[in-house]
Amino acid sequence: MSRAYLNMGISEKIKDDLKNKIQRNLDRAYITRVLKILGTRPILSAYGSTFASESDKILNIASIKSLKNAYSGRYPVAYGSLFLPYEMIHALGLAPFLPEVMAGFTGGLGITDKTLKEAASKWYTPDLCTFHRSAAGAVELEIFPKPNFLLCANLACDAAQKTFYIDAVKYNIKDNYYLLEVPFTKDKTGIEYLANQIQNICEDIAKKTGKKLDMDKFSKTISLSNQFRHWAIKLNSIRKKLYNYPENFNGLNFILPFHGLAGTEDAVKVYRSMYFEFKKLLEVQDAAPKNKSKKRLLWLHLKPYYKNRIFNVLEENNYILGFEEINYVYWPELDTARPFESLAVKMLSHPLNGSIDNRICAIQNMVKDYNIDGAILFSHWGCRHSNGGARIIKDSLNKSGVPLLILDGDCLNKNNSSEGQMLTRLQGFIEIINSSYK
Amino acid sequence: MAENSSILTFEQFINEGTCTAFKERTVKKGQKIGWFCSYTPEEIITASGFIPYRIAGINKTKKAEGYFPINFCPFVKSMMEDLLENTAKNESFSGLIFTNSCDCMRRFYDVARNYLSGMPAFMLDVPRNRSALAVRQFINNIKNMLSFLEDISKKNIRIDLLEDAACLHNKKRAILSEIESTFISHIGFTAANYFKIMDYAMTEEPGVFTANLKKYLEYIKNAGKAMYCPRQSRPGRHAAANKYISKENSPPVMIVGNFIQENKLWEIFDELDCFIAYADTCSAVRYFKNITGLKKDCKHLYDNYALAETGSTGPITEKILTDIAIRQLYKPQCMRMADLSKKIEEINKNIDKYKIKGIIFISQKFCDNTLLFYPLLRQDLNILKIPSLFLEIEHNNLSAGQVKTRIQAFLEIL
């Protein structure tokens, strides 16, 4: 047994073994079995204790619970694209499954080569976004749970609406495919149009699942969503001042609770626990103000989900992510008495909807609020939406004296990213920021 | 060149002076409104007193590269280059109408607003769903476009102007449909000529263009009578040019794609004697098919309202805008629309109608909407046992030799 192996933490060993087993048994039934075992209370508790921080533990437990539900066969499964108002899915009693987010897991599990190969054999060209190609490959390989409904929105991205439709054809459920059309501008007619669509879709799904639209459940879900929002805002306000995060914390890992679990107890729990954990850290920091020497970066878009050294390099150079664009609470408090309209407002408030001015305005707010020294836009291969606005974002931030690094790479396919090149550019960027402080 | 020398192309016909000459083809300041996507209702632009001019990316991308990432729609980059060049020559448009067609178009709108200072730009939000709800929303959005144009022109768009413009564009669409039938059935009518006509259709003043095209159609039907032959009995595209190729060698092919306006590419098709029986692209049928509603002979229906109507709001306007919205949403659809099965149905119907033997699918590089349609189309074509060729091209940067070889190989297997 090698020395490195002996030095490996137990938790890492367990996770790596699990990863290897899934890689060898790539099918839905095996994943269901693993999740069933992992999802039992004692195992989940033991698994949770392997995480270094409370926030990491709660995040992982909530993710496993959500996945277990989607694979269990006990609930109708709804595939959802990233920026849907998931409150509607929870209120309808469906188990959400986010193929794009789970494509990120394929990167972490090291199975992207297989999913991408499968997608290529089905005529998905390499010019397309790797998240959607990998998700399409996973659907074709029947790794993902079988969907009963597919809901997507045109918010921010063209690809999900197409891949979801192909999935609907594969499973012969074209009538259960819904596209929520988010108007380009947020105005009265746009809100009404979107709210009507949400209501019609909810009524249709309720009818198909043999249930009546339970408005009480909608009201409760909206209330939970407001609680989650409340804790997320409180957490973010602490992050405005915080320079030291819990071990292994990475704000870019919270897409699932932030979107997919909105409207659930789990999302409330994740953000409430994080708030208290971060509050303690702030108290420690306030007692030792010397920790404030770190430089703060704003991360735009997503990160590479395979093993990489980007965040180690940042840490080694005394940098932290002051904030991440994806954790920005962009919507107002929702009205429990008017769920459909509230959810429409939530979607229309998203900075990635409409013109780039909305995104820039949000970014400028984040720069100001989180005391940002520089920003990194991870330019994921194939994301026309985000990358198409890079030049405007760069120019806008330059005007405010905030340098932006556009880091070209691929969030999932490590073969399509040159780590050496990325790290060299990152080092250069760090030098520029450091020199401006001399 | 496969073109029959005894038939003048539309461009030659115009240049011979038998038609009302088009005004100078360069963009004059204050005359034109630029548009980009076939979902734009041109009649609204015409009613506002401007000439609708489709910006088709005629320039090779140079400066525009700096505004967009590498893996970004080459067509959008090229259109940006057109705008930069026009601005540099101080020949810019009075305004631009963008549509919410795709991610690249949305960012193009942002870039144009940020870097073409003073250029009024409007984003027309075109729904992806086809439903009563979507039509209502689209009517609202068209009304906003109308207000935008009224602001630029500083004029009210009167109901009669709107009605006349709608009739004018319907006439243009009708004659383009006739041209399409002639292209399919006429031996000497080349693909390069057909798509050049589309180029004129999308950029010239619609009244003058329609009158000219009508004359050209007459010319084709009379002067070219000897070569006119219905498709069912056509012996081959080059029979009249003494380059007889048997019918088996030119089986009907359908082109499916996005905005493919590459003269070099169409010349390749002509050189290879490829018989294009149907071209489902943004610059062909998706531009002119589906003429619905609004006809002059329905005018009496509106007479009761005529006196009450003073501006661009009122029941008649509502009726006209409804017609326009329905036409645009229910025309042969782009792959951006939600229900892709409807697109497959459309294609299948045309495969039957035109006895299609093979499909050539052509997409601009990085066009997510189109590229993500191909896996579905391919599945369907496999069931129908219709072979297909997948071509990804870069706007204004065609690898002619490679493309020619691939099309040639594909035609050989048909």
Image (cartoon, coloured by chain):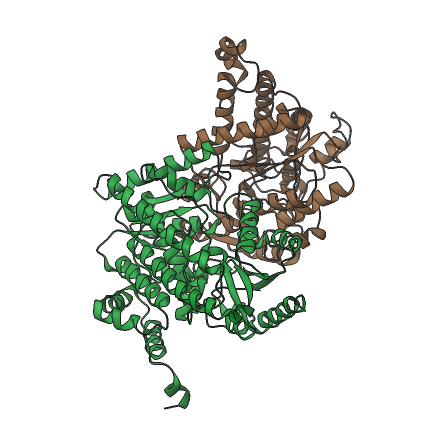
Residue A235: horizontal and vertical position, in percent? 41, 57
Question: For this view, does B390 lie left or right of residue A216?
Answer: right
Taking depth in this image into account, of A44 and A168 the one nearest to the observer is A44
Residue A74: horizontal and vertical position, in percent? 21, 55
Compared with residue B218, is residue A57 higher up or lower down, i.e. above or below?
below
Taking depth in this image into account, of B171 and A198 the one nearest to the observer is A198
Whether residue A66 is visible to the viewer of this picture, yes or no, is yes
Question: For this view, does A206 lie left or right of residue B322?
Answer: left
Residue A370: horizontal and vertical position, in percent? 52, 57
Q: Which residue is drawn at 61% across and 19% down?
A: B161
Q: Which chain is brown?
A: B
Question: For this view, does A150 lie left or right of residue B294?
Answer: left
Residue B341 image-quadrant placement: top left
Colour of the chain lettered A: green
Taking depth in this image into account, of B76 and B201 the one nearest to the observer is B76
Residue A296 image-quadrant placement: bottom right
Taking depth in this image into account, of B358 and B393 the one nearest to the observer is B393
Residue B229: horizontal and vertical position, in percent? 58, 33
Q: Which residue is drawn at 32% across and 64% down?
A: A58
